[in-house]
Each structure stands twice: as structure tokens, then as C-alpha cells.
Image (cartoon, rainbow, N blue to C red):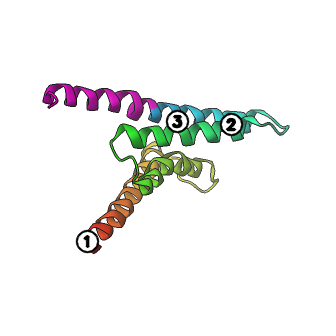
Amino acid sequence: MSNPLTAKLSIAIRFVVFGVGGFLLMLGARVSFLDELASRATHSVWPVAFTAIGIVGAVSMLYGVGEWGRWAYLGVFLSIPLSMLLWFVPFYPQDKLAGALAPAVVAVVAYLLAKRHYSRGQSRS
């Protein structure tokens, strides 16, 4: 029988290392991706590499929050950097609050859709 304190500590460490670490990895890759696109006129392989690193960060977050195997939640994690592309649309509102809320709103909607997806699967079983 395992110690409940050890189990909770293990979950906390997994969350910090994989959840927070994956989030930082994903956002860092996203910023580097956008910087690489903006700074070079020639084509480079780096945007593809940064995209792969961002996906690894999202998968890491999936493990870190204890949702491994529930792949629909990847949509929630990947919606954050994808919704940041709205910032580069010319007609997007330049207000700081609107700019900050867009990724949050998109992530909440993606979360609710993923949650609904899994609640339907459980009700069928």
C-alpha cells in the first residue's frame, strides 16, 4: 500500500515538471516560431521544428494534468497558441484586454467541447 502523502507529492511534481514545463515549452516554441517567421525573408526549417516542439509541450501538459489518453484535451492546449494568431489579423481589436481575452475564451470553449465529448462517451457506457 502506498503512502497518500507520497502519492500527492508525486502528482504535484508531475504537474509542475510536465504541466507547467510543457506549457512553457509550448509557449516558448510559439514565440520562437513567430519570431522566426517575422525575422526571415528566406524559408527555414525552424518553423517546422518549433511546431513539433510546441506539440511535444502540449502532449507533456496532457500527462502533467493527469489526462493522458484523453486526446481531445490536446485541442484545449493547442488552441492557446493557435488563437494567438488572431493578434496578427489586421482587423483584430488592438485593445490589451481584448487581446488577452481571445486565447482565454478560445481555450475555455475548447475545454467545454472536450468535456462534453467525454461526458457523452461515459453516458453511453
3 horizontally vs 25: left or right? left
Choose top left, top right, bottom left or bottom right for residue 56.
Answer: top right
> Circle 1 — which element?
helix
Q: CA distance from mark 1 to mark 3?
A: 35 Å
**For marks 1 and 3 on the same chain, the one whose residue lies earlier in the sequence:** 3
The location of residue 93, given as percent across then percent down, is: 53, 52
> For the point 31% across and 26% down, which residue is it?
13
> Which percent across, then down, holds residue 69?
41, 51
| Tag 3 secondary structure | helix
Residue named by callout 1: 123
Crowd rating for badge 2 (residues with CA inside 10 Å; few <14, some 14–19, many 20+): few
Q: Which residues are magenta?
A: 1-21
Disc 2 vs disc 3: Cβ atoms closer than 8 Å?
Answer: no
- The residue that disc 3 covers is 27
Q: Say which of marks 1 and 3 sits in front.
A: 1
- Residue of label 2: 49
Left/right placement of residue 79 relative to residue 29 reads: left
For marks 2 and 3, the one nearer the N-term is 3
Closest to the observer, 113 or 97: 113
Depth check: give the residue in front, 37 or 56. 56
CA distance separating discs 2 and 1: 40 Å
Name the chief secondary structure element in magenta: helix
